[in-house]
Amino acid sequence: MAKRVLLAGGYGVVGAQVARLLRKHHPDTEILIGGRREAEAAKLAAELGNARAAAIDVTQPSPLREIDGIDAVGVFIHENDDHLLNEAARRGIAYMDITRGLDAQLRGLAAAALHAPAAPMLFTSHWMAGGPAVVAKRLAQGLDSVARVDMSILYYTGDKMGPDSASAGAGMSQGFTARVDGAWRKVGPLSDDRAVRFPSGATRPVYRMNMGDVVTLALANGASEAGVRLGLDKGNSLGAMRRLIRLGLWDLLMKLPGMNAVAATKPGPGAPHEIVIEVDGEAGGRKAARRATIFDPQGQSHLTAVGALYALERVAGLGPTPLGPGAALPETGFTMEGFNRLAALYDAEGIRLAIEGV
């Protein structure tokens, strides 16, 4: 039987790309484009076919009260009050969210656990909707122990992003907890810089940043050390940002009208996106070094959309490795079959994934 999937915020920068990918890869799936901007939703629904607009307001209780018979909901807008999450959990509707910051993701996981839902609830507000985290898990397969997992990101300042990214920079001046030398330790903001060579051939400095992957890269792979680092394609504004943080000026700067990290980097119409993932460990008594690179010429919003499609397949039962009931993260229930599905989606969408040392 064909599935019926609601995309909350499905007309946004990432949501619309997910809607088109869902139609391309699952032509029989009925798609509901949900949100408050009904004209935009209706226009996209008409383009997709076998789709319709659905008026929902996640700021109000019971946003799904007028909608019946959906198998899954994908969330591409910030949900500050968890009304959609709570209703999906109560009604046994599969749920997938890619938009939560760290605190909101922790709150969502706690709410899902307390509901003990009868359907999967996947929280994948990781880098690029958790796809790179799944690749990291693949690199760790077959190792007897994992010493280090590092994800390095090259962000192009001309790349596009949606309005929900406008709060980027909040918390950038704060230290955070990461896995270092086999223990959870507080690390400084934009610390532990190093030079990384990316798949395009560019070598850039990268700096520690905080997000969900910082914790799950360590836990999912049993790593003694794990980190996520960010670099920019030109200049070294992150180095300048670090100096401002040390001088206590960054938070003051962010309080000025119109200022945030997005404004500082002036995102543009689009650019490539590059990621390097490194895993060191031991296998059979020998040291092992493994590396993966991801290059998406269409940029970070496209790479995020493909990762979100993979996540949506898992909660809606559209792919080879569906999730069971309860709260889940990107690496939950990892299998080689599931990884191969992600790799196939990357390949089909022109994303270059290369793995070395496996």
Image: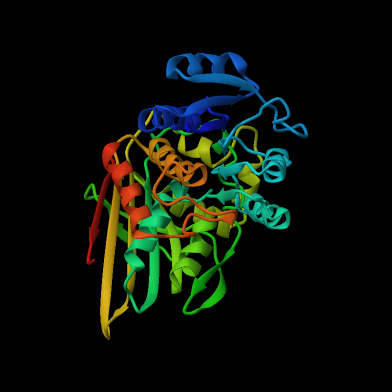
Q: Residue 345, located in which quarter of the rendered image?
A: top left
Q: Identify the residue at the far right of this view.
A: 61
- Asked whether the viewer can see residue 58, the reply is yes
Along the line of sight, the residue nearer the viewer: 114 or 268: 114
Q: In this rendering, would 186 be left or right of 150?
A: right
Q: Residue 175, located in which quarter of the rendered image?
A: bottom right
Q: In this rendering, would 96 be left or right of 224?
A: right
Q: Identify the residue at the far bottom of this view.
A: 285
User: Which residue is painted at 51% across and 52% down in the image?
Assistant: 323
Judge whether 209 appears above or below 300 on screen.
Answer: below
Rendering colour mode? rainbow
Along the line of sight, the residue nearer the viewer: 7 or 210: 7
Locate residue 294, reporting x and y percent.
30, 49
- Asked whether the viewer can see residue 350, the reply is no
User: Which residue is painted at 54% across and 32% down in the image?
Assistant: 5
* Image quadrant where one finds the C terminus: bottom left
Q: In this rendering, would 329 be left or right of 60?
A: left
Locate residue 329, reporting x and y percent.
53, 56
Judge whether 143 appears above or below 10 on screen.
Answer: below
Locate residue 68, reporting x and y percent.
66, 29
User: Which residue is painted at 23% across and 47% down in the image?
Assistant: 200
User: Which residue is painted at 47% across and 47% down in the image?
Assistant: 314
Judge whether 56 appears above or below 243 on screen.
Answer: above
Q: Residue 17, located in which quarter of the rendered image?
A: top left
Report how many numbered discs are placed on residues in the image. 0
Locate residue 249, reporting x and y percent.
61, 51
